[in-house]
Image (spheres, rainbow, N blue to C red):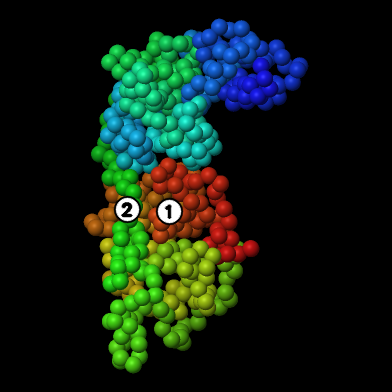
């Protein structure tokens, strides 16, 4: 074969587990020949050990992205192949469709996915229930290229999808990812271009349940793509044996359980939509629906606007509720007069309030127009801006802007204050137990309004609570463990939702960007918080 094919073949065999990276030298020719035979075995072509045209074409065929040979399974004695984990330890599983391909649409993806799950449920006695939250056992999503895990897709053809075994890869355990660059179809005709979504989904769900690739031609878990007759599909004998071993040969911990209403979540996957707001000169500005205050662009204005800020007309100008008044001598001496070093991180709170970014540390605050762009004259003592807060309050633990009325809520210790921009309201300070927190919680570490469902989330230690601002109650089933926000550490310093809907978490001098579509922290995080948010170098 030509050199290009040889290089491609070696990369293929290394990627899919047939060769170790060190098995490419001349002293390993026997290993290479055996590896080629294994490739041919999985592809159900003649096992010659020779890198011929048929083998090269097999390697270039459409297939699953998982390895065929697992390091932990060098000499299998059973017909079927199980993955490196022991499968799920419960019989009732939840799944969440994080997004879907516009080529198929939401309804088609849901319908075909249910068909695929039903095929496995029949022989495993597993039950599957769709939920609308990141707390699901299995998350199904479409992506392309680098899409949130460490296994990027390769564009049209070749790798169609991949999945993760139960208990594997930490936060990705059980998840299924499809390559959005493929031409997805529902039951395409024999001569129609495209990839049948059901055929790929039923294979990947097998991985999600704990099955590895099988060399058997009739197995759904064979790594190479094949389309099935939608009217007569059933699992292969190999697949049935494997799923029996995982889920019927041993008792699971919820054998006689049933779903409880407390397990049901109201969270939705509603994406932020955009609206167009115009000034009287019809110049549009884009803003997201979760921003309560519309901003305008351009240097044009109406006559009334001009009169309001032009002193010769005698019209008082508008009052900026976040503009600090003239300095007032405090009635008590602040506990600390030294400006803390923001470039060391350890922020007390980070909040997006009324269109601006505020960073609090001890009794000081930084005001920024955007990350790294500090307003002139800052940092200042926080009472210069929020002058009605009591002077005895020397630290803000958390802060957020309430969706229902745009009031700002400050948390410190076991109390909170409601600030309308000019004054303190609602009998503040109030106990944090108003938020449904138990009395043993002595402080709120972080708080945010999540862009996915517009509910308020409060974090303390390794737990979080979901609060409904309309009913003023904590939702049923809370608190829950913070590791449901996959990749986010416990004992946070702060959390916030930025203007574009991205969620950020802060701890020490680090911060994490949380992907609200994939429901886990983005790759390449954490990063230095002070460098990005305060521009420290």
Q: Which mark is residue 502?
A: 1
Q: Is residue 184 visible?
A: yes
Count of all numbered marks drawn on residues in the image: 2
Report the residue at 46% width, 49% height from top: 514
Q: Residue furthest left?
A: 471
Q: Is residue 16 above or below residue 393?
A: above
The residue where tag 2 is placed is 273
Using the image as rendered, state which of residue 497 and residue 334 is in the foreground. 497
Q: Is residue 223 above or below residue 459?
A: above
Q: Quadrant of residue 1?
A: top right
Q: Is residue 91 above or below residue 44?
A: below
For marks 2 and 1, give the one nearer the viewer: 2
Q: Position of residue 14 (x, y in %)?
A: 62, 24
Q: Secondary structure at mark 2?
A: loop
Using the image as rendered, state which of residue 350 and residue 29 is in the foreground. 29
Report the residue at 33% width, 23% height from top: 188
Using the image as rendered, state which of residue 491 and residue 523 is in the foreground. 523
């Amino acid at each position: 074969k030509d050199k290009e094919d040889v290089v491609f073949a070696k990369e293929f065999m290394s990627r899919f587990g047939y060769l170790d990276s060190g098995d490419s030298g001349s002293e390993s020719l026997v290993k290479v020949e055996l590896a080629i035979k294994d490739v041919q075995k999985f592809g159900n072509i003649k096992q010659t050990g020779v890198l011929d045209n048929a083998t090269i074409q097999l390697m270039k065929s459409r297939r699953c992205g998982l390895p065929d040979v697992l390091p932990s399974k060098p000499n299998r004695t059973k017909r079927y192949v199980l993955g490196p984990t022991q499968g799920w330890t419960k019989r009732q599983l939840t799944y969440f469709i994080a997004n879907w391909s516009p080529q198929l649409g939401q309804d088609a993806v849901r319908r075909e996915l249910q068909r695929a799950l039903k095929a496995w449920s029949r022989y495993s006695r597993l039950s599957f229930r769709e939920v609308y939250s990141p707390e699901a056992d299995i998350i199904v999503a479409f992506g392309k290229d680098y899409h949130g895990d460490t296994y990027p897709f390769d564009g049209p053809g070749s790798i169609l999808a991949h999945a993760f075994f139960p208990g594997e890869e930490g936060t990705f355990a059980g998840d299924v990812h499809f390559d959005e660059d493929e031409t997805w179809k529902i039951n395409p005709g024999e001569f129609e271009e495209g990839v049948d979504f059901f055929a790929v989904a039923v294979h990947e769900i097998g991985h999600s349940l704990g099955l590895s690739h099988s060399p058997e031609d009739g197995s759904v878990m064979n790594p190479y793509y094949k389309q099935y007759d939608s009217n007569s599909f059933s699992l292969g004998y190999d697949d049935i044996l494997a799923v029996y071993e995982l889920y019927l040969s041993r008792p699971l911990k919820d054998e006689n359980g049933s779903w409880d209403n407390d397990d049901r979540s109201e969270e939705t996957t509603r994406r932020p939509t955009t609206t167009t707001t115009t000034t009287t000169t019809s110049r549009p500005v884009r803003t997201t629906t979760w921003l309560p205050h519309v901003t305008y662009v351009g240097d044009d204005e109406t006559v009334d606007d001009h009169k309001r800020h032009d002193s010769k007309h005698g019209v008082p100008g508008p009052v900026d509720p976040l503009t600090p008044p003239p300095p007032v001598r405090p009635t008590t001496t602040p506990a600390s007069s030294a400006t803390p070093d923001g470039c060391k991180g350890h922020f007390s709170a980070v909040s997006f309030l009324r269109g601006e970014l505020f960073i609090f540390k001890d009794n000081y605050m930084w005001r920024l127009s955007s990350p790294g762009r500090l307003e002139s004259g800052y940092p200042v003592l926080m009472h210069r801006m929020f002058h009605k807060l009591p002077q005895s309050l020397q630290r803000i633990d958390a802060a957020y802007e309430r969706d229902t009325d745009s009031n700002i809520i400050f948390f410190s210790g076991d109390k909170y204050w409601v600030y309308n921009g000019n004054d303190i309201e609602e009998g503040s300070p109030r106990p944090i137990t108003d938020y449904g927190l138990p009395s043993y919680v002595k402080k709120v570490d972080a708080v945010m309004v999540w862009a996915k469902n517009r509910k308020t989330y409060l974090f303390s230690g390794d737990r979080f609570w979901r609060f409904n601002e309309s009913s003023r109650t904590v939702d049923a089933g809370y608190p829950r463990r913070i590791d449901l926000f996959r990749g986010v550490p416990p004992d946070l310093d702060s959390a916030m939702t930025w203007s574009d809907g991205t969620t950020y978490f802060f701890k020490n001098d680090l911060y994490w960007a949380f992907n609200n579509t994939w429901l886990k922290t983005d790759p390449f995080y954490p990063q230095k918080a002070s460098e990005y948010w305060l521009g420290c170098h």
